[in-house]
Image (cartoon, coloured by chain):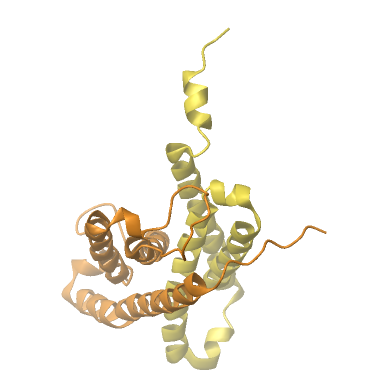
Amino acid sequence: MTLLTAVFAAVICTVIWYKSEAARELKVGLLCWMFWGASVMWLVDAIFEYAELHAEYFAPAAEDMLNDLFLGLSVVALGLIIWIIVLLVKDPKGVVKAALTRKKA
Amino acid sequence: MACFLVPAAEAVVATIATKVIHKKEDPALTAPASGEAPDKPVKVPFSRKLKWLTNLLWGGSVLLAFEHVWHGEVVPWFPFLTAASNPEDAAEMLHEMGTVGVTMALLITAIWLVMLAVSKVIEKRPETPQLEAK
């Protein structure tokens, strides 16, 4: 479930990055790298787990699935937080700088 | 247990290599930063290509590290890895790093090599006209 969540997040971010110039300016590419990297690593984890459990791997307990989904969503949230921090620090459109240096009328 | 440490270690090495190569690269050979159209095919600098690898490795390692914190395998106090507190678990952890961790690093590197091959093909492709808006 964690792998699935990461893969969906990676695919959605990649489509947004490809379609939108504004998204590329807002460094959505960073999210693509993070989610694809994590997806590949969890895929390896899943392959090793499958080699150990065989068919049982595809029939997880409902509680485990829910916990994994919760983890996957938390990972996506962490990725988004990292992205927003990088965006505000790098400030590609100069919005943060403009807000900080704006003089009151 | 600590499989993410192997790709994280590779990420450190790749990041250092990226910085060193970037300093040595001739700026004249690389793609122009501005939007102006180049008069000859654009060559993507190798340091930028190496950055793709570091991005994949760092991104995946950070998110996997979070997963290990979630499962209580990484803790904020010494020795930071719960499996390192006794020899039996430490041996299991090292085995996992040698199997799962190394496979993760190898697969990411293999995917990056495929990306290099694809980018080489794209670099050689002639400029395509923008699709007309409907």
Q: Quadrant of residue B24?
A: bottom left
Residue at 83 percent across and 59 percent down: it is B134
Place of residue A7 in the rendered image (x, y in percent of width and height, measured from the top left): 56, 70
- Depth check, front residue: B49 or B61: B49
x%, y% of residue B117?
43, 78
Task: Name chain A's colour.
Answer: yellow
Determine the residue located farthest toward the right in the rendered image: B134
In the image, A95 versus A63, the foreground residue is A95
Residue A4: horizontal and vertical position, in percent? Answer: 57, 72
Image quarter where the N terminus of chain B lies is bottom left
Number of numbered discs visible in the structure rendering: 0
Does residue B59 appear in the picture of this structure? yes
Left or right side of B27 for B44: right
Camera-side residue of B24 and B99: B24
In this rendering, is residue A76 above or below B128?
A: above
Task: Determine the residue located farthest toward the top in the rendered image.
Answer: A105
Look at chain B in the picture and name its colour. orange
Q: Furthest-left residue in view?
A: B87
Residue B18 percent across, percent down from the top left: 28, 60
Left or right of B21 on screen, residue A1: right
Q: Residue at x 48, y 59 (%)?
A: B39
Instruction: Tell me the quarter of the picture where residue A52 sits.
Output: bottom left
Residue B50, placed above or below residue B99: above
Whether residue B72 is visible to the viewer of this picture, yes or no, is: no
Q: What residue is drawn where x is 44% and y is 91%? A: A51
